[in-house]
């Protein structure tokens, strides 16, 4: 039996292979400073595949056909999935005070479609569900559904499962927790699950922002694409937001992360607030 080392050093040439692939195919910048992080995350994958060196691991990953599954694991390992419930709460405030009332006024427009683009493990989509369901209590004729997409299959699986640790849900207001979370029957687990009524509202789907065409057959009223663009270079950011804009209805809304901007980009979007945009006719 071959003895596998737990942590081997990654050669610069191996890092360059990974960097080139990730930057071209996923859009994420991988500066040299990230090498230690990539090395540590991919050592686990190298061990799982059962090879001694990163060179062998990458040959396996990039081998036509056979590496497809491991390619997804490699992308999963290098993406940053940091997220939270009720992250950047001003967007949810804007949703309930500006966006939803404007829809409630339009008699025949009470079905809104939302997209959590770069959804990670689902916290953004389920926060939106909680906020919308609260609104629904006083506006029962109002309906919505949410598409949640990400490149990482691992985060999509967690989002679909909708099970979170108690620490992860600590920021959710108590009343909201009581309404929308179920405690695990197994007392040793210390986890909660999103109630089925909210889980039914969200569809998880894999989508790579780098794809030429986004395979979604309808347009959205509201898109959250938050804390995703920061990982891309400027030309990629512009291309991605242009493709996302095509999927927003005229008059619909786009929310970006707090440190993201589309300044100097020629896009059919009007700025309403620091990270809030409205789609205009191109
Ligand atoms: C930092 S998380 C942001 C999650 C959430 N939007 C938020 O603000 O809390 C960024 C997500 O973007 C996803 N992502 C990165 N590159 C992507 C790509 N090319 N296509 C689709 N998703 C991508 C990552 O997998 C990750 O889950």
Image: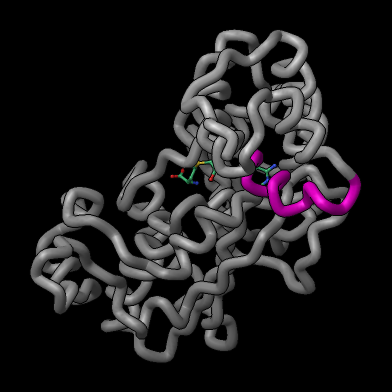
Magenta segment's dominant SS is helix
User: Residue most toward the bottom?
Assistant: 141
**Residue 114 image offset from top left, x and y in percent:** 56, 66
Query: Is 281 colored magenta in this rendering?
Result: no
Which residue lies at the image location 45% right of the left edge and 62% below the top edge?
159
> Which picture quadrant has residue 16?
top right
Q: Is residue 179 above or below residue 119?
A: below
Q: Residue 229, image x and y in percent? A: 62, 33
Quadrant of the frame with the N terminus: top right
Looking at the picture, how far across and down is residue 151, in whole percent?
A: 65, 50
Q: Which residues are magenta?
A: 64-75
Residue extending farthest to the front is 1
Task: Left or right? Give the position of 217 relative to 183.
Answer: right
Seen from the viewer's position, the closer of residues 25 and 269 is: 25
Q: Quadrant of ligand 1?
A: top right
Residue at 18%, 67% in the rendered image: 176
């Amino acid at each position: 039996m071959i003895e596998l080392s737990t942590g081997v050093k990654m050669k610069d040439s191996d890092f360059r292979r990974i960097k080139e692939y990730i930057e071209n195919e996923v859009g994420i910048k991988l500066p040299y400073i990230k090498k230690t992080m990539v090395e540590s995350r991919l050592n686990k994958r190298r061990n799982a595949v059962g090879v001694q060196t990163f060179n062998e691991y990458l040959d396996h990953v990039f081998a036509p056909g056979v590496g497809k599954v491991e390619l997804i694991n490699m992308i999963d390992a290098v993406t940053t999935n940091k997220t939270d419930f009720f992250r950047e709460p001003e967007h949810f405030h804007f949703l309930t005070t500006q966006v939803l009332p404007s829809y409630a006024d339009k008699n025949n427009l009470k079905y809104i479609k939302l997209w959590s683009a770069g959804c990670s493990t689902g916290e953004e989509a389920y926060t939106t569900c909680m906020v919308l369901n609260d609104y629904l209590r006083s506006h029962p004729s109002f309906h919505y559904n949410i598409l949640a997409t990400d490149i990482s299959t691992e985060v999509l699986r967690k989002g679909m499962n909708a099970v979170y640790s108690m620490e992860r849900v600590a920021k959710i207001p108590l009343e909201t927790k009581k309404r929308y979370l179920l405690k695990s029957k197994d007392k040793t687990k210390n986890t909660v699950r999103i109630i089925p009524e909210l889980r039914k509202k969200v569809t998880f789907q894999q989508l790579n922002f780098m794809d030429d065409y986004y395979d979604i057959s309808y347009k959205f009223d509201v898109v959250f694409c938050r804390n995703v663009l920061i990982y891309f270079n400027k030309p990629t950011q512009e291309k991605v937001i242009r493709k996302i804009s095509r999927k927003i209805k005229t008059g619909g809304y786009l929310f970006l992360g707090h440190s993201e901007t589309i300044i100097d980009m020629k896009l059919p979007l009007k700025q309403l607030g620091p990270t809030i945009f409205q789609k205009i006719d191109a």
